[in-house]
Image: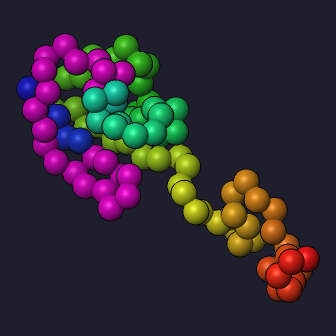
Amino acid sequence: MKILYINNDGGGFADYISIEPETTISHFVDQRLKHGLATDYLIRVNRQPVSSDYTLQEGDRVSLTPTKIEGARGALGQSHGCRETEGDLLAPAGR
């Protein structure tokens, strides 16, 4: 059966793909995420969150969107997980 798979990771893409009947969303995500954890992604089917045991249906629209982006900076220019201040950025090396 065919579903529309929307991968918003990196460059992103959308394509119709064939999957086995009776495939659960959990099994599908495990197959598609070669690296990373499912908990680091927003997983939706037909624009709605679903439980891990949801069985995909013909024509479903599945999207995987990362919730954590490597190297992303916050609104104040701060790197996630690191608290830099303007003074830290302008300080001489070896401080």
Picture quarter containing residue 27?
A: top left
Q: Position of residue 54 (x, y in %)?
A: 34, 17
Is 39 placed left or right of 5 in the picture?
A: right
Residue 26 part of the magenta-drawn span:
yes
Quadrant position of the C terminus in the picture: bottom right
Is 23 placed left or right of 48 in the picture?
A: left
Residue name at image x 38 percent, y 58 percent: 10
The answer to whether one can see residue 42 in this image is no
Q: Position of residue 77 (x, y in %)?
A: 71, 72
Give the image's coloring scheme: rainbow
Residue 44 part of the magenta-drawn span:
no
88 vs 28, nearest the viewer: 88
Is 9 placed left or right of 73 in the picture?
A: left
Instruction: Please determine whether, in this image, residue 35 is positioned above or below residue 83.
Output: above
Q: Position of residue 64 (x, y in %)?
A: 37, 42
| Magenta residue span | 6-28
47 vs 42, nearest the viewer: 42
41 vs 84, nearest the viewer: 84
Picture quarter containing residue 23?
A: top left
Is 81 placed left or right of 36 in the picture?
A: right
Residue name at image x 10 percent, y 32 percent: 18
Number of numbered discs on residues: 0
Instruction: Please determine whether, in this image, residue 54 is positioned above or below residue 71.
Output: above
The answer to whether one can see residue 81 in this image is yes
Quadrant position of the N terminus in the picture: top left
Picture quarter containing residue 50?
A: top left
Residue name at image x 31 percent, y 48 percent: 7
Residue name at image x 28 percent, y 46 percent: 6
Instruction: Please determine whether, in this image, residue 41 is positioned above or below residue 91.
Output: above
